[in-house]
Every structure is written in structure tokens, then in C-alpha cells.
Image (cartoon, rainbow, N blue to C red):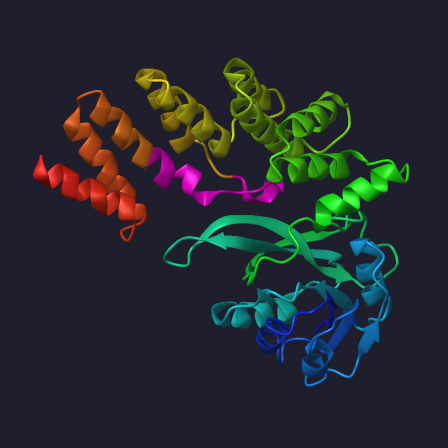
């Protein structure tokens, strides 16, 4: 059975770190924690779980810090987590079973990363990340921000999920500040970093600047398909927010030049037409979303609701506006099967009962 080193970088995480390390108790053979400058009780709390604590001066480069943590690992595989990540109780048996059954020639184990949740606690945003990595210098993080280990070798996809349970707001400007510092110093942003830089500009409502960066990324022959598709979505919203509606629609449709339609984009196109009263066209796109299979292994960001709940609920709205109350009711009931606790479904249910 393989051994695992849990490798973490932390700073001022006294509110989260015990929850994270407690969720991993008894599951890994070694815990490596690299502190990048905590001024709270983080190091004191970590010392209750491991003696392998290292101080590392923060230099605005997540990859450097993470790779330093990997360099301290002595087990067969390295596993990374953030301080506000947890392994839920219902995942622990699967975690141990995977350790027992893992083929020794496996290089990387990909696990689900659930980062957002609905009102019932079910994942509403997820994607796969490299989570167990063979302990060798071949595998190292790249990227100062949104760091990643490029997957290669023999890769195993597991349905084990790590849950990101963020508390507090953190430093919302940190990533953008790092990118601007890199650019000011003359550093080249490779395509993946260019995409994430555009996202940060978007999050900071710098829509014109985001368009410029993301359009440059889309025009490049390089870059990952999933990032291209997501860039179309972000860029389209930037166009909407700057009053260029036709360019927004063109950019959403452009996403399909990279690969088959994604339900997430189909829902956005459906919303575009619904908001403009073009109901029959909106129906077409929501039906397309509903009939689009999810590909969890593409590596892209997955919004599970866009493959059933959202298009069902929006089809209810469309058919109600078209005057087909029976069909609208049927779609709402189907949405309720997906989320019986949904406030929107329950509101619609009362609406139809009163009619």
C-alpha cells in the first residue's frame, strides 16, 4: 500500500487549519506544513498534528512555496490541500480503499474538487484536480498564481471529493496584485496565466481590460480548450456589461468552435434570448443544455445544475410566458425532482396551484 505525504502551505489560518488536518487524521503517513508568515496561532495549532513545520518567506509565487513543501516529503506520493479544504466523513472509507487498491505504476490521482454548494449542501461547482502526485522531481507546480502540476504519465480518475469550505473574505486583491507585479517586472504570462489574469480583471469589474486580455488569449494558437471555452463565457459577460450585446452573443457562440457545446454555455445563450423575449429560441438552447452529456473528465469547470435543474426551471419560465401552463408545470416538477428543497421550485409550485 502506498504512503502519502500531505503537503500544505499556510498563512494566518488559525480558523481553518485544525478542521482541515483533523479531517485527514489517520489517513496519511506524513504531514508537511510550510508557513509563509503567519501572525496568528496557525503554527501553534499545526504543531498539534505534526512536527514537520517549515518557515518559508513569501515571495508572491504559490508554485515556489508549494514546490518547497513537496521537497520536504518522504513518502511515495504527495497530496496537496489548502487550509480551508476538508475531506468529508463519507469520503474517508473511499480514500483508504483507494490506497489499498492503487496500482504501483500510477503517477497521478485526480480527485473532484467541490468549491461551491447549494442551500442543501450539494456541490454546485466542481472540477477535477491532480491530488496525489508521485513523489519525484518530475512533478512540480507551475504558475505564480492558480498553480498547477501539469498531468502526465499514468493518470487515475477517482470519484473521491475534496471540499473547499472557505471562511472569511481573505485578500480579494492578492491575485490581481501579483499578476500586475509580474507584468510590471516584464515577466511573460503564458496562456494559462493570461486566462486567469483576464478572470481576475473581470472579478474586479475591469471589464474593458478583461476583454483585451481574454481576446488576446482567444486569438492565440496556444492555450487549453477548456480555458478557451470559459474565456468565451467571461468575455461575453464583459461585453454585456459594457453595452455590446451582439458581441456577447457572438462570443458565446464562438465557444462552440473549440469543442461540442457545454451545457453551461447553452444556458447562458438561453438566458440571452429569454431576457430579450425570444422565447422559442431560448427554449431551443435550454433543451440543448438539457440533452448535453456532462464530461467530468474534460478538466473544465462543471456547474452540475446546468445539465438538469437550471434548464428545467428556465423551460418552465419560457413555457409559462408562451402560455402553455401545463408544459410549464411539468418542467417545474422535473426541476423539483432535482432539487425538492429549491425555493424557486417551491415558489413556482405554489404559483401553479393558485392558477
The residue sitting at 66% across, 34% down in the picture is 227
Question: Front-most of 118 and 111?
Answer: 118
The residue sitting at 53% across, 72% down in the picture is 93
Question: Front-most of 281 and 132?
Answer: 281
Observer able to see residue 146: no
Q: Farthest residue in the left direction?
A: 354
Q: Is residue 266 magenta?
A: no
Horizontally, is 172 left or right of 314 in the view? right
Question: Front-most of 193 and 262?
Answer: 193
Q: Quadrant of the C terminus?
A: top left
Q: Magenta segment, which residues?
A: 295-312
In the rendered image, residue 275, in percent from the top left (x then y), is placed at 37, 23
The residue sitting at 57% across, 54% down in the picture is 112
Residue 297 placement: quadrant: top right
In the rendered image, residue 210, in percent from the top left (x then y), is placed at 67, 30
Q: Quadrant of the N terminus?
A: bottom right
- Report the magenta stretch's main SS: helix
Horizontally, is 10 left or right of 72 in the view? left
> Is 24 located above or below residue 245 in the figure?
below
> Is 209 located above or below residue 18 in the figure?
above
The residue sitting at 52% across, 23% down in the picture is 240
In the rendered image, residue 95, in percent from the top left (x then y), is placed at 58, 68
Q: Farthest residue in the bottom direction?
A: 48
In the rendered image, residue 154, in percent from the top left (x then y), is placed at 74, 51
Residue 164 placement: quadrant: bottom right
Q: Is residue 309 magenta?
A: yes
Observer able to see residue 220: yes
> Is 339 located above or below residue 69 in the figure?
above
Amino acid at each position: 500500500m502506498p504512503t502519502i505525504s500531505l503537503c500544505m502551505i499556510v498563512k494566518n489560518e488559525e480558523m481553518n487549519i485544525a478542521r482541515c488536518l483533523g479531517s485527514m487524521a489517520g489517513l496519511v503517513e506524513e504531514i508537511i506544513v510550510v508557513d509563509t508568515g503567519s501572525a496568528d496561532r496557525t503554527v501553534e495549532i499545526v504543531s498539534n498534528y505534526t512536527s514537520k513545520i517549515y518557515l518559508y518567506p513569501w515571495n508572491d509565487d504559490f508554485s515556489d512555496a508549494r514546490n518547497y513543501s513537496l521537497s520536504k516529503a518522504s513518502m511515495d506520493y504527495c497530496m496537496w490541500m489548502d487550509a480551508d479544504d476538508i475531506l468529508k466523513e463519507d469520503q474517508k472509507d473511499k480514500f483508504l480503499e483507494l490506497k489499498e487498491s492503487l496500482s504501483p505504476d500510477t503517477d497521478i490521482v485526480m480527485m473532484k474538487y467541490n468549491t461551491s454548494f447549494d442551500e442543501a449542501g450539494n456541490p454546485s461547482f466542481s472540477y477535477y484536480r491532480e491530488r496525489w502526485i508521485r513523489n519525484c522531481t518530475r512533478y512540480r507546480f507551475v504558475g505564480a498564481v492558480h498553480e498547477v502540476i501539469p498531468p502526465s504519465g499514468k493518470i487515475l480518475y477517482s470519484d473521491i471529493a475534496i471540499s473547499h469550505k472557505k471562511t472569511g473574505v481573505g485578500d480579494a486583491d492578492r491575485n490581481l496584485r501579483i499578476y500586475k507585479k509580474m507584468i510590471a517586472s516584464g515577466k511573460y504570462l503564458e496562456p494559462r496565466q493570461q486566462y486567469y489574469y483576464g478572470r481576475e480583471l473581470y472579478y474586479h469589474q475591469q471589464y474593458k481590460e478583461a476583454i483585451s486580455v481574454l481576446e488576446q488569449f482567444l486569438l492565440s494558437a496556444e492555450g487549453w480548450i477548456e480555458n478557451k471555452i470559459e474565456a468565451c463565457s467571461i468575455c461575453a459577460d464583459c461585453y454585456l456589461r459594457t453595452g455590446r450585446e451582439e458581441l456577447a452573443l457572438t462570443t458565446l457562440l464562438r465557444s462552440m468552435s473549440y469543442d461540442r457545446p457545454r451545457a453551461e454555455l447553452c444556458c447562458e445563450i438561453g438566458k440571452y434570448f429569454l431576457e430579450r423575449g425570444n422565447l422559442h429560441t431560448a427554449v431551443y438552447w435550454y433543451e440543448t443544455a438539457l440533452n448535453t452529456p456532462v464530461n467530468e473528465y474534460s478538466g473544465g469547470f462543471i456547474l452540475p445544475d446546468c445539465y438538469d435543474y437550471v434548464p428545467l426551471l428556465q423551460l418552465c419560465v419560457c413555457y409559462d410566458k408562451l402560455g402553455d401552463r401545463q408544459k410549464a408545470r411539468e418542467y417545474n416538477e422535473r426541476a423539483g425532482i432535482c432539487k425538492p428543497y429549491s425555493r424557486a421550485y417551491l415558489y413556482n409550485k405554489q404559483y401553479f396551484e393558485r392558477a
